[in-house]
Amino acid sequence: KAGVTQTPRYLIKTRGQQVTLSCSPISGHRSVSWYQQTPGQGLQFLFEYFSETQRNKGNFPGRFSGRQFSNSRSEMNVSTLELGDSALYLCASSPPGGHPYNEQFFGPGTRLTVL
Amino acid sequence: AQSVSQHNHHVILSEAASLELGCNYSYGGTVNLFWYVQYPGQHLQLLLKYFSGDPLVKGIKGFEAEFIKSKFSFNLRKPSVQWSDTAEYFCAVGDTDKLIFGTGTRLQVFP
């Protein structure tokens, strides 16, 4: 079974631009979560989607948004990029049934650098 | 809101030394606890998890963790580390539909 895939793997943007990151979960997984990883803050939860609905959201500004499609693929968008948005963005998917965090499988991440 | 503390930010050991990484969480009710590992250049992987039952949990690669409810702790242990254990280790607690992670512990093992 293929793992969680994220595209692109690396991105360089400038302040003020916007960016869209994509995540394809493991086949059959319907829950997709997004995390931001930075050296100082560790991993911080952004949001979680299940069946195209956002079920939970972390403490990030409205510039961070996401969506999920009917095939469970998910995208996250960051508008008006700031230098502090430079981070590794991780996507994780969870198998159906039980708690969504019962077993989260992580993708390789997208490394975003904002100049 | 739940929180997770990992007090060891950077640990340096020689091969064959024993390892214990601390993890404390804030929530006093039923908890679901995890340890994840991120090897250099690799995906975050689940090492072990605790939901209920035996408080001593065994994971992959010889790791184990002990849930001590009275101390709000879930420390990770390994009796004898190897160079290949060099990685970043994250403790996490499940909260509704998300994981709350600690800030991580960077482990360096020298031959």
Image: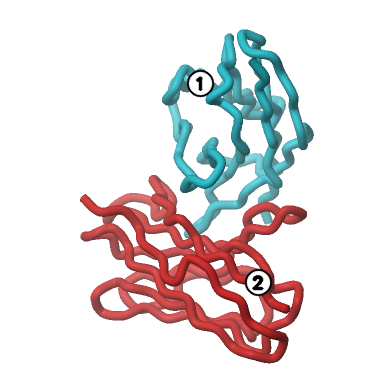
Circle 1 residues within 10 Å: few <14, some 14–19, many ≥20: some
Q: Which residue is mark 1?
A: B63
The quadrant of the image that shows the C terminus of chain A is bottom right
Question: Splitting the image into 4 quarters, where does residue B60 fall?
Answer: top left
Q: Residue at x 73, y 37 (%)?
A: B6
In the displayed structure, does residue B41 sit left or right of residue A40?
left
Q: Tell me how far mark 2 sits from mark 1, CA to CA.
A: 34 Å
Q: How is the image coloured?
A: by chain
Q: Which residue is mark 2?
A: A113
Q: Amino acid at mark 2?
A: Thr
Q: Chain of mark 1?
A: B
Labels 2 and 1 share a subunit: no
Q: Is residue A94 visible?
A: yes
Q: Residue at x 43, y 53 (%)?
A: A106
SS assignment at label 2 = strand
Q: Amino acid at mark 1?
A: Phe
Q: Residue at x 31, y 53 (%)?
A: A3
Picture colour for chain B:
cyan
Q: Position of residue A96 (x, y in %)?
A: 27, 56
Q: Is residue B72 visible?
A: no
The red-coloured chain is labelled A
Q: Chain of mark 2?
A: A
Q: Along the line of sight, which residue is nearer the eye, B61 or B65?
A: B61
